[in-house]
Image (cartoon, helix red, strand yellow):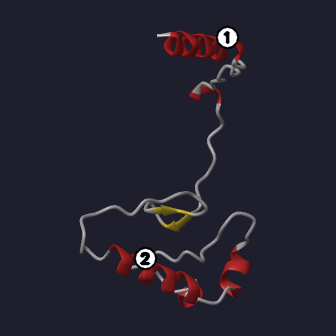
Amino acid sequence: MSTNGHLRREVSTYHETKPRVSSASFTRLSDLTPEATEWLWHLRIPKGELTIVDGDPSVNKSSLLMDLAARVSKGREMPDGWCPLTIGRGQSQEDSAATPGCGGR
């Protein structure tokens, strides 16, 4: 009985001395400025963003990712014809034409 009373006192002391966590801050969506999205694979995989490939077992998720890695590393088109090496941020059409891969597009 005395052990429980002692434990209760320690718990209540812990809660009283626990440092306060700062409050969360919020930003309204109306206060944000939209930014253009750069695509690795147009409307499917954005560049530099987290992309989750989800599916049932044995539906070739790993094969898809290996194929995409090979296409990107070799500068080849995506299955729908999209070229990830087309004009990007800070790149002119001349720079894009000089970039090897995707048939010089």
Q: Is residue 99 above or below residue 84?
A: below
Q: CA distance from mark 2 to mark 1?
A: 51 Å
Indicate the quadrant where residue 33 lies: top right
Number of marks in picture: 2
* Front in this rendered view, residue 90 or 71: 71
* Front in this rendered view, residue 94 or 37: 37
Q: Residue 61 has which mark?
A: none
Q: Mark 2 — residue?
A: 65
Q: Is residue 58 left or right of residue 48?
A: left
Numbered disc 1: secondary structure: helix
* Front in this rendered view, residue 41 or 55: 55
Residue 61 locus on image (x, y percent): 34, 73
Q: What's under tag 1, amino acid-wise?
A: Glu
Q: Is residue 40 left or right of residue 44?
A: right
Contact, CB < 8 Å: mark 2 with mark 1? no
Q: What's under tag 2, amino acid-wise?
A: Leu
Could you classify mark 2 by the number of other residues whose Cα lies within 10 Å: few (under 14), some (14-19), or many (20 or more)? few
Q: Residue at x 37, y 77 (%)?
A: 62
Q: Is residue 93 left or right of residue 2?
A: right
Q: Is residue 60 above or below residue 90?
A: below
Q: Residue at x 43, y 62 (%)?
A: 44
Could you classify mark 1 by the number of other residues whose Cα lies within 10 Å: few (under 14), some (14-19), or many (20 or more)? few
Residue 29 locus on image (x, y percent): 57, 29
Indicate the quadrant where residue 85 lies: bottom right
Numbered disc 2: secondary structure: helix
Of the 4 image quadrants, the one containing the C terminus is bottom right
Q: Residue at x 67, y 19 (%)?
A: 23
Q: Residue at x 44, y 60 (%)?
A: 43
Residue 78 locus on image (x, y percent): 44, 78
* Disc number lying in front (2 or 1): 1
Q: Mark 1 — residue?
A: 16
